Image (spheres, rainbow, N blue to C red):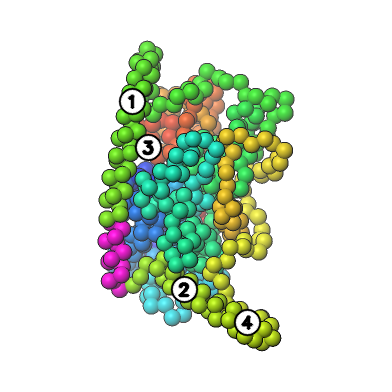
């Protein structure tokens, strides 16, 4: 019987499986060559949450992905010659949060087993042994683990006001304004609780890695993607920042320094314009003058179209959610979030009973204080554990530095969530620095073809190094690094190729 290692890839908000085509291609290319040394890798690009489906909330998106995973396992194990024995999952952007919920469901239902972990009592699990998998790799890329961050800018204030209304259930969860359990706690708070399945399931994986953009990610900023309370890269363009790239996996960085002799970085010819334009509106001179002349008309029109689209999509999402809730209410089993709500109510009643007993018999309660009911509502961070490892050592923030408008405003709850997640054992962080790209059309296309056809990782690394060296000649500023970090659309945007080093670092680092 042959063994299968199932790897699930989850796209982000408004996304579709095609956004992770490069990720799938690279991981297959990496591990198909040495498949004799490990179990066969099978990649599943989840499809059930494409585009508007991502509005329905992290929890409902995860429930759909779990159904898709089980369907895939059924298809693989239809013939007795194959069996899924190992499980890995990687989520990009929103997909990372969905992945955290997915593994909570799988672990709670007994689909994930780990010989060195006793977090889940699976002795009475109804799950057939043929469906139980060993959790191997859990990874997220540019995922808002702390929710979306607020800044002291007008745009940020508007986003926090309108986001929960225009992005349906997912928007409420992004901004920690959802209250879908009996305790009224936001889902991201619940998912970081060390005593609940979402957190405990992560401890079962042999490897937990997160990749975060250091700069230029206008969608998921550094602090929430890297699970940090401070942003050492604030105003980096003005501080004379110098970075050291990983010799093999550029644009991942290994170190950085702030030059004290040159506090201000001179603006280069490729500096970003005061009014950034979407790629399809970027035209050469003199057509760019025509585009800027039309901006007073284009900008209001764009806002109206976006508002209408989001409003209609949110309305359709609310209808889908109501149907899902009705189906689960009448169905065979409740969703995990509903089950946790029942658990919270049970624990609350037990705590209330304990308080009443303590009031009635304070001496007796003192004698029995050694056996207490574990709380699922604990707001304190867990006991200290080894700090997460990283390819880069970040200096401590300067308390005397004056905050700027780009300084993230982290809430007390987000700090609690951050502390909990950083207590995950074996957590590894990779920091990505995407600032500029080189438009060397013919030579780069030729090298890309060689890279795809070559079986030598050393040759691929050498070609990437050559591309890096040529990047000094014609640099193009990258306005938003959120899509390039996963090479989301290399067919239409050449600068998305810069994320190849990140994907190869992720793929070659998977434990098989």
**In the shown orientation, is residue 77 left or right of residue 216?**
left
Label 4 vs 2, first from the N-terminus: 2
Q: What label does residue 298 carry, if any?
A: 1
**C-alpha separation, residue under disc 3 versus residue under disc 4:** 63 Å
Q: What label does residue 489 carry, if any?
A: 3
* Main secondary structure type of the part rendered in magenta: helix
Question: CB atoms at circles 2 and 3 under 8 Å apart?
Answer: no
Residue at 27% across, 66% down: 327
- Residue 358 in the magenta stretch? The answer is no
- Which residue was labeled with disc 2? 345
Q: Nearer the viewer, residue 330 or 424?
A: 330
Task: Say few, some or many: other residues with alpha carbon within 10 Å of mark 3 (under 14 / 14 to 19 / 20 or more).
Answer: some
**Tag nearer the camera, 3 or 4:** 4
Image height of 121 relative to 420, above or below: below
Label 2 vs 3, first from the N-terminus: 2
Indicate the secondary structure of the residue bearing disc 1. helix
Residue at 46% across, 80% down: 123
Residue at 48% across, 22% down: 273
**C-alpha separation, residue under disc 4 versus residue under disc 2:** 21 Å
Where are the magenta residues, as a range?
A: 320-332
How many badges with numbers are in the image?
4
Q: What label does residue 399 carry, if any?
A: none
Identify the image quadrant of residue 391: top right
Label 3 vs 4, first from the N-terminus: 4
**In the shown orientation, is residue 508 left or right of residue 339?**
right
**C-alpha separation, residue under disc 2 versus residue under disc 1:** 52 Å
Task: Say few, some or many: other residues with alpha carbon within 10 Å of mark 1 (under 14 / 14 to 19 / 20 or more).
Answer: few
**Tag nearer the camera, 4 or 2:** 4
- Which residue was labeled with disc 4? 359
Task: Say few, some or many: other residues with alpha carbon within 10 Å of mark 2 (under 14 / 14 to 19 / 20 or more).
Answer: some
Label 4 vs 1, first from the N-terminus: 1
Quadrant in the picture for the N terminus: bottom left
């Amino acid at each position: 019987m042959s063994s299968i290692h199932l790897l699930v890839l989850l796209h982000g908000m408004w996304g579709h499986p095609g956004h992770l085509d490069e990720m799938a291609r690279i991981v297959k290319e990496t591990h198909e060559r040495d498949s004799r040394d490990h179990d066969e890798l099978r990649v599943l690009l989840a499809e059930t949450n494409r585009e508007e489906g991502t509005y329905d909330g992290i929890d409902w998106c995860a429930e759909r992905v779990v159904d898709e995973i089980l369907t895939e396992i059924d298809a693989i194990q239809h013939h007795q010659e194959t069996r899924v024995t190992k499980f890995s999952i990687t989520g990009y952007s929103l997909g990372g949060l969905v992945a955290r919920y997915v593994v909570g469901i799988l672990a709670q239902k007994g689909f994930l087993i780990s010989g060195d972990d006793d977090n889940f009592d699976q002795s009475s699990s109804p799950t057939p042994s043929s469906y139980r998998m060993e959790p191997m790799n859990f990874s997220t890329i540019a995922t808002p683990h702390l929710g979306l961050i607020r800044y002291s800018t007008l745009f940020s204030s508007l986003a926090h006001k309108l986001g929960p209304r225009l992005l349906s259930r997912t928007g409420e969860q992004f901004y920690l304004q959802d209250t879908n359990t009996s305790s009224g706690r936001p889902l991201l708070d619940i998912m970081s609780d060390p005593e609940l399945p979402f957190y405990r399931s992560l401890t079962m994986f042999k490897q937990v890695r997160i990749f975060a953009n250091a700069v230029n990610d206008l969608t998921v900023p550094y602090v929430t993607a890297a699970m940090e309370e401070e942003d050492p890269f604030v105003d980096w363009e003005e501080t004379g920042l110098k970075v050291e790239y990983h010799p093999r996996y550029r644009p991942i960085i290994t170190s950085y320094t702030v030059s004290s002799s040159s506090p201000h970085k001179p603006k280069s010819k490729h500096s970003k314009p005061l009014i950034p334009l979407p790629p399809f509106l970027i035209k050469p001179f003199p057509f760019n003058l025509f585009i800027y002349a039309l901006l007073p008309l284009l900008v209001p029109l764009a806002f109206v179209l976006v508002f209408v689209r989001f409003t209609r999509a949110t309305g359709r999402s609310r209808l889908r959610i109501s149907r899902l809730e009705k189906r689960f209410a009448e169905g065979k089993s409740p969703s995990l979030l509903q089950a946790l709500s029942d658990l919270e109510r049970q624990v609350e009643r037990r705590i209330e009973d304990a308080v009443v007993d303590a009031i009635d018999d304070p001496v007796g309660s003192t004698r029995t204080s050694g056996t207490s009911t574990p709380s699922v509502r604990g707001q304190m961070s867990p006991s200290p554990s080894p700090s997460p490892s990283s390819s880069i050592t970040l200096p401590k923030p300067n308390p005397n530095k004056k905050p700027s408008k780009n300084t993230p405003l982290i809430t007390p709850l987000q700090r609690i969530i951050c502390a909990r997640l950083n207590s995950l054992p074996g957590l590894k962080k990779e920091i990505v620095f995407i600032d500029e790209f080189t438009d060397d059309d013919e030579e780069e296309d030729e090298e890309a073809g060689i890279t795809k056809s070559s079986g030598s990782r050393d040759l691929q690394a050498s070609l990437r190094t050559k591309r890096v060296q040529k990047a000094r000649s014609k640099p193009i500023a990258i306005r938003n690094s959120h899509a390039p970090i996963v090479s989301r659309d290399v067919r239409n945007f050449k600068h998305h190729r810069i994320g190849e080093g990140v994907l190869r670092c992720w793929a070659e680092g998977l434990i098989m």
